[in-house]
Image (cartoon, coloured by chain):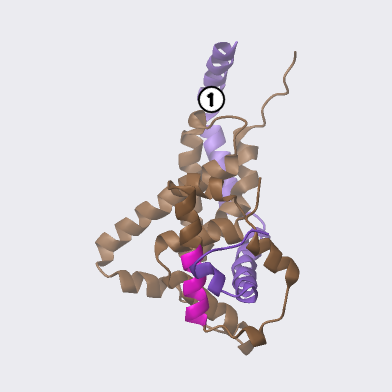
Amino acid sequence: MSEAPPPAPRDELLVHIPSLRAFAVSLSGQIDRADDLVQETLVKAWRNLGSFTEGTNMRAWLFTILRNVYISDIRRRRREVQDTDSVFAESVAVAPQQNGHMDLADFRKALADLPEEQREALILIGAAEFSYEEAAEIAGCAVGTVKSRVNRARNALARRLNLDVGEIGLEPQLRAALGTPPHS
Amino acid sequence: MTQRKGEASELDTDVQAHIGRQLRAGYVDILNQPVPDRFLELLAELDSREGRRAGEENDVRQNRSR
């Protein structure tokens, strides 16, 4: 029985860079900082490729590394800055440009103000579209914990953004996508 | 469709859709960007730096799996 040679690690990592960046930007709210997080993640991943189990989900493995890199980064910043509020304020320095974009800027601010663990859970489920099981693995907690964090995050955002349902168009597909957790 | 219990049931599905749309929009924005050069350079550097060593490790790994 002949096996196909495994793809070069370099190519395998390359495939996942766009989603790592999207995850890092969503977590940190800043593109420059996000790219530094991705850089550190790639170096760590490269060094630890031996501990990755082939045939398992590499994207989830990389997200776990990035998540840990991000948390160390936050701890480091907290020690340096001694002021969590300014870290968060800095992380949402996205000025609303046009009226049409106000919504998104408000949303980013609200997202950035969520507790870390809630924001992380919401991004993993609602944006990166991991299953609850995968998200639990990445966040290092129970599946039920992910679910409750996502629910709390959604409720907090809804309250914070003062959403008026009447102004929001119905999008059944999106609603369905959000209403049911993705399965892999 | 699964029924959500407790707090979540108070949250209208349209509000959820709105939140999901915003969340996904920012994410997909970045997802669709080309990989910045700094990462291509980084991977090339890691590859060349560990090229020789990786070769030896691969031999060991293959021998072990047989």
Question: How far across and down, in percent of the image, does residue A72 sit?
Answer: 35, 52
Q: What's under tag 1, amino acid-wise?
A: Ala
- Foreground: A156 or A33? A156
Chain letter of disc 1? B
- The span picked out in magenta is A151-161
| Residue B42 seen | no
Q: Are there few (<14), some (14-19), or many (20+) residues within 10 Å of tag 1?
A: few
Question: How far across and down, in percent of the image, does residue A101 sit?
Answer: 61, 82
Q: Is residue A113 magenta?
A: no
Residue drawn at x 41%, y 48% is: A68
Q: Is residue A155 magenta?
A: yes
Quarter of image, res B26: bottom right
Residue drawn at x 51%, y 44% is: A42
Tell me: B48 left or right of A176: left
Q: Quadrant of the C terminus of chain A?
A: top right
| Residue identifier under label 1 | B54
Question: How far across and down, in percent of the image, does residue A83 sit?
Answer: 27, 70
Residue drawn at x 61%, y 62% is: B3
Q: Colour of chain A?
A: brown
| Residue B2 seen | yes
